[in-house]
Image (tube, rainbow, N blue to C red):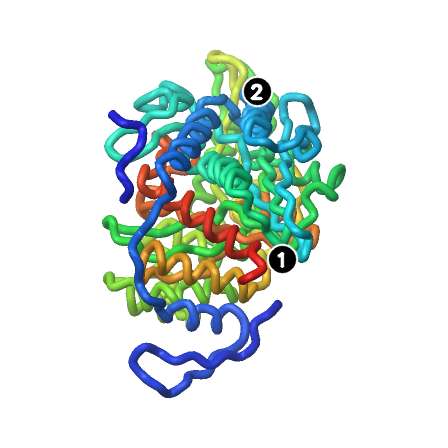
Amino acid sequence: MSRLTPNRGELGGCVVYTQHERIPRMFKPGVVCFVAAILLGFSASAQTTRSDAEKQLAHDVYKQFVEIQSGYTTGETTPVAEAAASRLRAAGFADSDIFIGGAIPKKANLVARYYGTGTRKPILLLAHTDVVEAKREDWSMDPFQFVEKDGFYYGRGTADDKAQAAVWIANLIQYKKEGFKPDRDLIVALTADEEGGGPYNGVEWLLKNHRDLIEAEYALNEGGWGEESNEKKISNDLQVSEKYVLNFRLEVRNKGGHSSMPVPDNAIYHLASALDRLSKFGFPLKTNEVTSAYFRAMSKIDNGPNKDALAKVAENSPEAMQRVAAASPAWNAMLRTTCVATMLEGGHAMNALPQLATATVNCRVLPEDTVEYVESTLRSVLADDQVSVKLLRQPSPGPISPLRPDLVDAARQLTDKFWPGVPVVPIMVMGATDGAYLRRAGIPCYGIQGFFMDRDDIRFHGRDERMSVQSFYEGQAFLYELVKRLSSVSQ
């Protein structure tokens, strides 16, 4: 089988005209106004991808990155950084334009700079090169082999986040080949440990130790992707905010004893009962500025049985939110803080009563919910004084990135060029990205990719992770044109 397939600030109040009327409608400032504007179409044009040579380069970089074992715990990101640097040097980038470094030798980051005229501040093009761990026995194939099958590329990191990392490198090489002269520097940063954070997180380390290397007007990152359902494209999402992460360690300690003389006071039973109560609990449903705008936009796009409910969610209808949350795990996660048990450990011997039982609870928290609120709610739900609750790391939520008219317009126009009639919709991503570090440091960050995923079959972090072959090459072309448009004097 061939490795390649054939070419298939703030916004003030605004006045917009619909396609069916000449009377202007007034909208409130901010995201709501933006959503109204994005629903207006531009003239349609055919879908495009880059040349075969450019696609081949992107494919080869992608394959190379995926086949480097860079799991958060057992792998290394340094080989990915070195592989990218080698390709950039071969394309004519000077050693002085390439930086490799990190908190420890095996957790290196790459930062590469493509020089423009300096008329405007740089754009940072961000992607992470670490991936969630994957075990061969859990997959139907080797997770660290790049496999093309039935129109998809399979492998750990194909969607999260080595596709975007590969595209940034391939496109930067293409700009160099063309002699493109942007009006601002383009900075590509491929970073470590996004999946686990902690002391080796690449973006945090760069901000603390080499901020000058990544200082930018704003950044483009993962976190926003295209949504499709039943092979129909629904929206190209633009991420402007995200949940933040809290990890709690639950512990129950006990004196233990011989298993032949069991007693009701069992550490595992205490923990199991507490986790059962957590499994039946849901944080309150609510919207914020971004999610309200998202559901309002979805109500104009979605023609399914939840269409009316989606519109009512934007109006904070409790009944509608319940219905929408029950219809989709993604929508449920957009509407509330969530806490879920992800790891479990207990006991020390088969013939002994447990002296220790532990669990990790991972919470994805709405930006407006405080750490204190989540922790106190968790303790109340667990309802057992023998279950201790320890916050593993103190986070700090990031602000919302302001909607930039230049980025919004470019994303909207290019989306309509590649996928006619598909709107750009602002989202709060349910997970978390390295964009939070940048936003807290004063560098706005926007998640946008142009890679479309089936909203009911997103395999980030899961078994048989994959990316549509066609979507990868369309995303390559979309990001190529988006960055070029955002860094050209004529725009």
| Spot occupied by residue 322 in the image (x, y as percentages of width and height) | 36, 61
Amino acid type assigned to the residue bearing label 1 in the image = Pro
User: Which callout, 1 or 2, points at the residue further toward the start of the chain?
Assistant: 2
Amino acid type assigned to the residue bearing label 2 in the image = Gly
Which of the two discs, 1 and 2, sits closer to the camera? 1
Of 144 and 451, which appears nearest the observer?
451
Q: Judge the density around disc 1: few (<14), some (14-19), many (≥20) Cα neighbours within 10 Å.
A: some
| Spot occupied by residue 25 in the image (x, y as percentages of width and height) | 42, 83
Q: Where is mark 1, residue-wise?
A: 399
Q: Where is mark 2, residue-wise?
A: 256
Which quarter of the rendered picture does the C terminus lie within? bottom right
Of 365 and 185, which appears nearest the observer?
185
Residue 383 in view = no
The residue lying furthest to the front in this view is 179
Residue 35 in view = yes
| Spot occupied by residue 468 in the image (x, y as percentages of width and height) | 32, 39
Q: Which mark is residue 360?
A: none
Of 286 and 201, which appears nearest the observer?
201
| Spot occupied by residue 154 in the image (x, y as percentages of width and height) | 35, 30
**Left or right of 294 in this view: 471:** left
Q: Secondary structure at mark 2?
A: loop
Q: Judge the density around disc 2: few (<14), some (14-19), many (≥20) Cα neighbours within 10 Å.
A: some
Which quarter of the rendered picture does the N terminus lie within? top left
Q: Residue at x 48, y 20 (%)?
A: 262
Q: Residue at x 38, y 66 (%)?
A: 297
Q: For marks 1 and 2, give the CA distance.
A: 47 Å
Q: Does 80 sit above or below residue 204? A: above
Say which quarter of the image contains residue 2: top left
Q: Does 324 sit above or below residue 249? A: below
